[in-house]
Amino acid sequence: MSAVTGFKRLGFAVAAVLLAIFGVLGIVSVLIPADQVREAIKAEIRTVTGLDPVLRGDISVSLFPYGKVSFADVTLGDQAQGASQGTPPLVADRLTTKLRFFPLLTGKIEVADVALENPRISLVIGEDGRSNWLPLVASLNRAFGPDAHAQRVMSFSEIRITGGTVTIRDDVRNISERVTDIDMSLAWPAISKSFAATGRVNWRDEPVDIGVTFGDFAATLRGERTGLKVRLAGAPMKFAFDGTMSMRPTLKVEGALSADAASLRRVMAWAGHKTLPVGGFERFALKAQTNVVGGTIALTGANLEIDGNPAEGVLTFATDGRQTLQGTLAADAIDLTPYLSTIRLLTDSEREWNRRPISLDGFSDFELDLRLSAAKITIGTAKLGRTGIATNLRSGNLTVTVGESRAFGGVIKGSLGLATAAAGVEFKSQLQFTDIDLEPALAELFGVKRLEGKGDLA
């Protein structure tokens, strides 16, 4: 038998197999009623996810040439779920499932993957602290609980979301957020225990790439300890976390955190905070070990860099009630010029005080208790030696205490204060300059160049 004849026979055999397959699919599409396909898919989605799809719109079933079922106007969960908040947790314009090929040849319906088109996901926390997602979380707990694990047969492990929108409303904290243009892939726990979500969203007019992975999805639902990885990347900033989390008895997160941004000022504005009234706060980078308990975030072994000023230390941020930042930082050299560039004691004529008003509005949203030590500090043309500073901001009043600063051949001690007043801001200074060189000190701090020698100022 020649090679040509062999290839012809092989081609005829392949064609016969394909015709047989398509013939079987055609017969299956006739013999299996559309209602049976619909109910089988609903049951499988309920088994795999624990969520019960409610179908209100048209249903499209196509088994030839490949299996595909599409449901219009879909709500995941019973109508009663979320009714206490008056908002269904998840509504989608269309839910489309693709069926597995070989089981379909035997007349068996198995879902290969699920896609949600234009889903609208709503998270509402009422004034009583209850969420409209509580019934759905309970359903997920039943589906992924230890008793149900042995009985669950996982046919699909991916849920794709296109054109989604997430709306968050917290009536307790008076928070409202909206995330749009969500295109994500959810790796549903099938063979492994993990759950992963990757894709892109749009938050506050900025596209952000997101990756979130829970090491044990069932443990996450029960509030137990599980691995957690988070990756965020967008134009405003990049963020990464690798550690663990648990929800019982309270929120606890531990792990390594890193973040960087081209402009910290832009990130704060993007996050909805007031613009700081001083200069600087541009280039930002942070690496630290993180410990979150309840509403308190502790950063230990922190390596922080702002505007090219590197420092190391410990930071604690409290979000319960009034936002508070506490910490201790140490640095070799710091340049404070960017932060004081908008504050000038004299006008360009150097003959009268600068009467431009000073505002503390940007500091009214939080409290600060920060201690900083540096071997060298630069403020414009002024060079300071080893310096220890304590900064305290409370109720909009700012106090900077200089423990000791080696400068101008002498020592500087004392405090500076800015306090909110009816007419604007009150400024208080209780600084003591001991045994300093008067000419460079007065020239660099006040622009006065008519004194020479050593002396004290208070």
Image: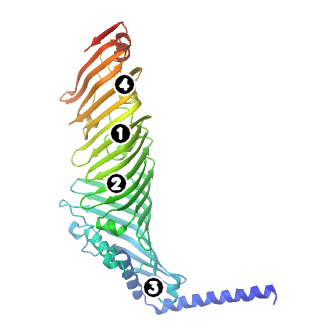
Q: Amino acid at mark 2?
A: Glu
- Can residue 56 be seen in the rendering of this structure? no
In the rendered image, which residue does mark 4 sit on?
386
Please tell me which residue lies in front, 428 or 359. Answer: 428
Q: Amino acid at mark 3?
A: Ile
**Dot 1 or dot 2, earlier in sequence:** 2
Determine the secondary structure under disc 3: loop
In the rendered image, which residue does mark 1 sit on?
313
Q: Amino acid at mark 1?
A: Gly
Dot 2 alpha-carbon crowd within 10 angstroms: few under 14, some 14 to 19, many 20 or more: many
User: Which numbered disc covers residue 254?
Assistant: 2
Determine the secondary structure under disc 2: strand
Above or below residue 92? Residue 150 is below
Asked if the residues shown at circle 1 and circle 4 are in contact, with their CB atoms under 8 angstroms apart, the answer is no
Instruction: Write down the quadrant of residue 408 in the picture.
Output: top left
Quadrant of the image containing the N terminus: bottom right
Q: In x, y percent, where is residue 49?
A: 36, 74
- Disc 3/disc 4 C-alpha distance (Å): 75 Å
Determine the secondary structure under disc 4: strand
- Disc 1/disc 2 C-alpha distance (Å): 18 Å
**Dot 3 or dot 4, earlier in sequence:** 3
Q: Which mark is nearer the camera, 3 or 4? A: 4
**Dot 1 or dot 4, earlier in sequence:** 1
Q: Amino acid at mark 4?
A: Arg
Instruction: Write down the quadrant of residue 17 in the picture.
Output: bottom right
Above or below residue 148? Residue 449 is above
Dot 1 alpha-carbon crowd within 10 angstroms: few under 14, some 14 to 19, many 20 or more: some
Q: In x, y percent, where is residue 301?
A: 37, 43
